[in-house]
Image (tube, rainbow, N blue to C red):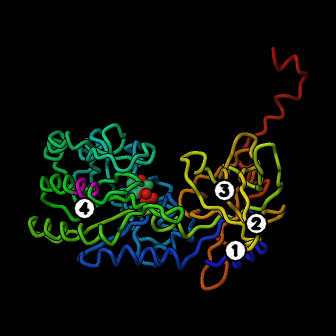
Amino acid sequence: MESQHLVTLAKQFGAPLYVYDAAKIASQYQRLTDAFEGVGKLRLNYAAKALSNLSILRFMNHLGSGLDTVSIQEVKLGLMAGFEPESIIFTPNGVSLEEIEEASALGIQVNIDNLSILEQFGSKHPDVPVCIRINPHVMAGGNSNISVGHIDSKFGISIHQIPHLLRIVELTNMNINGIHMHTGSDILDIDVFLYASEILFETAKNFKDLDFIDFGSGFKVPYREGDIQTNVEELGKKLTKRFNEFCADYGKELTLAFEPGKFLVSEAGYFLAKVNVVKQTTSTVFASVDSGFNHLIRPMLYGSNHEIVNISNPDGRERYYSVVGYICETDTFGSNRRINEIAEGDILCFKNAGAYCYTMSSNYNSRYRPAEVLWLNGRGHLIRERENFDDILKNQVDVKHLFETSRKEVLK
Ligand SMILES: *Cc1c(COP(=O)(O)O)cnc(C)c1O
């Protein structure tokens, strides 16, 4: 997306603002589909939690995607956005049996990731086919916050518990129709992923009525030039071959599923913020924007490196800046960044702002969450209004009457 369009959108809708480029989402969807063209039945279930705006979900449905959800609220959003129940999979972790039953009653495929709930669900609903989430105990990447398939992870049913799992399936007479793993957001090494896949294939042989194998996600996208990213084309070639071999052995053409979140929306997103203050200190030049980790927490939470560009002065001389927010604690977006000279009032653009950015935003410091715009066919379409003071007050209960007496009485 061209930066002059982003400048125009910031003027039109105000800053701070999230902008999502529909064409980029579509091309990522196509790229992944193409990488697995050799698979007879491929299903991509967009992971709603990456960016769950209703209009984005509608767009995903329009592209032909399914939906991966982790809460009953995401399930309901998906249904509202037009997804058929059969196109939604519910893959929660640590939620109650009631929540899983609620999703199942809506016709959603449930994916269960612990033996306790599996036993309870199977005993009560032996006729409902269930997918199981396996933990293959493989360390994907090095970031233990986002790597979720390793031995210490809370996710999935351990491969070492397969005997117990099989006992539950047999005793409850339930039907396992899918098998799933999700190793986290850091597939750097395709061979590690393929190794985990072998564990999944091995486990799958225990179940006679599978319809699909779900390989989760974890596709790494580049954040800056030269970054390592998952080579989905190479992964596509290698996994397709193994998957088709497995299906031939298994005696049935299964569906190969993925649940990409970041891969589909990360690079499509731009976060625009206005510079309030340029402050020269003894050690650096700070550019303070009208935002903070209330809007974009990834740099502070995960140390993620979002490229920052001054779209108001694309040809200006480059200088070193620390870009910070207005939150009353440290909220550095980027230190020692070379950025075209910044003046107060300029619009800075943060890249890779599609995944886990708006959805992780908050009202901290009693600030409003930004508006969201979808860039489609050369036009910006508002898909979420900026919050206002009513949103800050919403759901608060003002117990003013308790304090109408004298101060002494209240504290007695
Ligand atoms: C978050 C999540 C995803 C999406 O992961 P990305 O790295 O954003 O692609 C997929 N599957 C499950 C179960 C998840 O929890």
Callout 4–callout 3 Cβ contact below 8 Å:
no
Can you tell which mark lies on residue 206?
none
Is residue 409 placed above or below 192 in the rendered structure? above
* Residue of label 2: 347
Q: Amino acid at mark 2?
A: Ile
* Residue of label 3: 337
Label 2 vs label 3: CA separation?
15 Å
* Residue of label 4: 213
SS under mark 4: strand
Say whether disc 2 or disc 3 marks the residue closer to the N-terminus: 3
Callout 1–callout 2 Cβ contact below 8 Å:
yes
* Residue of label 1: 6
Q: Is residue 41 left or right of residue 4?
A: left
Label 3 vs label 1: CA separation?
21 Å
- Give the x, y percent position of residue 44: 36, 69
Q: Residues within 10 Å of mark 4 (few under 14, many from 20)?
A: many
Disc nearest the viewer among 1 and 4: 1
Query: Which residue lies most toward the top here?
Result: 412
View quadrant of ligand 1: bottom left
Q: Is residue 362 left or right of residue 157?
A: right
Magenta part of the chain: 192-197
Q: Is mark 1 within 8 Å of ligand 1?
A: no
Q: Nearer the viewer, residue 180 or 207?
A: 180
Is residue 37 placed above or below 242 in the rendered structure? below
Say whether disc 1 or disc 2 marks the residue closer to the N-terminus: 1
Q: Main secondary structure of the magenta part?
A: helix
Residue 137 occupies quadrant: top left
Q: Residue at x 79, y 73 (%)?
A: 11
Disc nearest the viewer among 3 and 1: 3
Q: Amino acid at mark 1?
A: Leu
